[in-house]
Image (tube, helix red, strand yellow):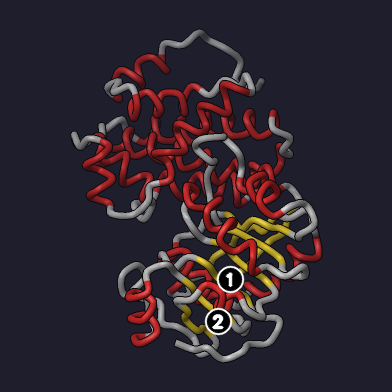
């Protein structure tokens, strides 16, 4: 593993799962010196030796400008930007761990999708609580599968930040011939899209696994988008954000392709697995499982009606058969489509 000093413009990517590895590869592929850190020291040693992540992203070869670090302080030393790519349940803990090592000029971004289960807070709210309000922050989201980014296939995503220059700089550093990043100032909308789409993707997997057909899937996506918008606007997001990459784009992707762990989770549930067995079979974090509970908490607190997400919650946590949940949705009172 490299311990050499990097230029001040280097980026530290924290989280060596499939998505963290893919983003580190993309930063390095675009020419920016990049360090990738993960908690599993043995895994990091193997990645440094093999120049790829055989466990989570075997097809993505590491560019020369990507180094691997097992020591958190070393990974952060000299970095200008820090990108956190960990599951939502670990986000607060990682920010707490890195807080002593963040200099005043270091900027923070994350590709974490989800709400904090205990509090219902969005990632940017957690970042402000842990690190204060002075640091530039941004979120990366959109219709992206790690395997395809790692392989260099054409991809687009959104980077949202209240600091337009920070978002623009990250977008420029990530973009290449096969990767295009767009910018936004609507951090709330982008984060809500990333959290709610995982719940709806579980529902899509359930629906398809039970053989409900294409009509049902499209109805779920369309009405799910309406629920996403409803919650986002109630929390201060811009409605137009949900018609873009981080809203509709990510929703369609995760609901229709089996690279989505959330969709596969729903398919396994439809095949008769318990949530615990389905999670174990997938072997990686399924954000939609905990997001279903967190989204329900926030929607209830905000007095926002989200019947599809409520149905997924009831299947997962109240053991309501999926067919019964669908029947309940189909027999709800008639109402206008556009609210």
Q: Are marks 2 and 1 in contact (CB under 8 Å)?
A: yes
Q: Secondary structure at mark 2?
A: helix
Q: What is the quadrant of residue 247 in the picture? A: top right
Q: Measuring 34% from the left and 52% from the top, which residue is drawn there? A: 258
Numbered badge on residue 29:
2
Q: What is the quadrant of residue 171 in the picture? A: bottom right
Numbered badge on residue 334:
none
Q: Quadrant of the C terminus?
A: top right
Q: Is residue 101 left or right of residue 63?
A: right
Residue 198, position in %: x, y? Answer: 46, 42
Which residue is tagged 1?
Answer: 179
Q: CA distance from mark 2 to mark 1?
A: 10 Å
Q: Measuring 56% from the left and 61% from the top, which residue is drawn there? A: 97
Q: Measuring 28% from the left and 41% from the top, which residue is drawn there? A: 267
Q: Secondary structure at mark 1?
A: strand
Residue 98, position in %: x, y? Answer: 59, 64
For residue 30, above or below residue 40: below
């Amino acid at each position: 593993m490299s311990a050499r000093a990097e230029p001040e413009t280097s980026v530290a990517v924290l989280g060596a799962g499939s998505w963290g590895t893919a983003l580190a590869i993309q930063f390095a592929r675009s020419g920016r010196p990049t360090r990738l850190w993960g908690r599993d020291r043995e895994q990091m040693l193997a990645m440094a030796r093999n120049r790829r992540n055989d466990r989570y992203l075997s097809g993505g070869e590491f560019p020369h400008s990507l180094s691997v670090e097992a020591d958190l302080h070393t990974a952060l030393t000299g970095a200008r930007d820090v990108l956190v790519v960990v599951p939502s349940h670990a986000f607060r803990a990682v920010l707490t761990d890195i807080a002593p090592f963040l200099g005043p000029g270091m900027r923070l971004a994350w590709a974490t999708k989800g709400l904090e289960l205990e509090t219902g807070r969005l990632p940017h709210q957690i970042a402000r609580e842990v690190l204060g309000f002075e640091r530039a922050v941004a979120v990366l989201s959109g219709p992206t599968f790690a395997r395809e980014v790692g392989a260099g296939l054409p991809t687009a995503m959104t980077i949202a930040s209240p600091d337009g220059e920070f978002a623009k700089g990250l977008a420029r550093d990530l973009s290449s011939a096969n990767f295009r990043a767009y910018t936004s100032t609507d951090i709330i909308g982008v984060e809500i899209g990333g959290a709610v789409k995982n719940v709806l993707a579980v529902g899509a997997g359930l629906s398809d696994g039970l053989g409900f057909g294409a009509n049902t899937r499209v109805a779920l996506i369309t009405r799910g988008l309406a629920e996403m918008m409803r919650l986002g606007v109630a929390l201060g997001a811009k409605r137009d954000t949900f018609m873009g990459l981080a809203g509709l784009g990510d929703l369609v992707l995760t609901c229709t392709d089996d690279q989505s762990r959330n969709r596969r989770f729903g398919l396994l549930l439809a095949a008769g697995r318990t949530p615990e067995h389905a999670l174990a079979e997938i072997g990686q974090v399924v954000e939609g499982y905990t997001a279903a509970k967190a989204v329900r908490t926030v929607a209830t607190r905000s007095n926002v009606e989200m019947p599809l997400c409520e149905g997924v919650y009831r299947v997962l946590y109240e053991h309501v058969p999926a067919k019964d949940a669908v029947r309940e949705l189909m027999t709800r009172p008639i109402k206008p489509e556009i609210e």
